[in-house]
């Protein structure tokens, strides 16, 4: 039976929330794979709680990252639009 990686996944999930969004994606993917292995009996199920917690942190980090990118894109469009409008209103 393979040892669980619950602690690693949990740490990656927390890092995804706090520091590096890429870690959140990695935690989500690793968590999915490890939970499937635990349910099929290939991996030690002792770390199931930590694995699920890390996966959830990874999902939240990924969603927050996507929302932030969308907000930044909308702000960029409004700033460019405002700059273009200001340039069009000034007399020659």
Image: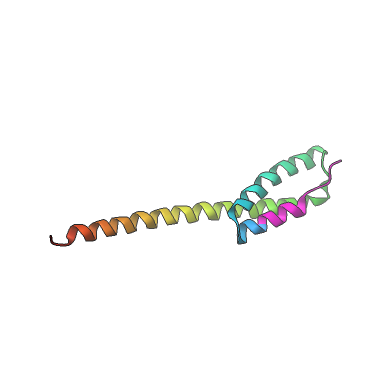
85 vs 5, left or right, is: left
74 vs 26, left or right, is: left
Asked whether residue 53 is in view, the answer is: no
Numbered range of the magenta stretch: 1-13
User: Where does the image place residue 19, in percent across and percent down from the top left?
Assistant: 61, 60
User: Where does the image place residue 78, in percent across and percent down from the top left?
Assistant: 33, 57
Q: Quadrant of the C terminus?
A: bottom left
In the image, 92 versus 52, the foreground residue is: 92
Q: How many marks?
A: 0
Residue at x 43% of width, y 56% of height: 72
User: Where does the image place residue 7, in percent across and percent down from the top left?
Assistant: 76, 55
Question: Mostly what secondary structure, the magenta segment?
Answer: helix
Residue positioned most to the right: 1
Say which quarter of the image contains residue 60. bottom right
Q: Is residue 6 magenta?
A: yes
Q: Quadrant of the N terminus?
A: top right
In the image, 26 versus 90, the foreground residue is: 90
Q: How is the image coloured?
A: rainbow
47 vs 60, left or right, is: right
Residue at x 57% of width, y 51% of height: 62
In the image, 13 versus 41, the foreground residue is: 13
80 vs 63, left or right, is: left
Q: Is residue 87 magenta?
A: no
Residue positioned most to the front: 92
Residue at x 65% of width, y 48% of height: 26
User: Where does the image place residue 41, in percent across and percent down from the top left?
Assistant: 83, 39
On screen, residue 36 above or below 47: above
Residue at x 72% of width, y 55% of height: 10
Asked whether residue 20 is in view, the answer is: yes
């Amino acid at each position: 039976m393979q040892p669980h990686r619950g602690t690693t996944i949990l740490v990656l999930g927390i890092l995804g929330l706090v520091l590096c969004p890429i870690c959140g994606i990695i935690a989500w993917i690793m968590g999915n794979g490890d939970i499937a292995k635990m349910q099929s009996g290939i991996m030690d199920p002792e770390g199931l709680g930590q694995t699920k917690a890390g996966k959830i942190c990874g999902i939240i980090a990924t969603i927050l990252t996507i929302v932030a990118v969308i907000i930044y894109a909308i702000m960029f469009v409004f700033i460019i639009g405002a700059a273009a409008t200001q340039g069009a209103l000034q007399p020659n």
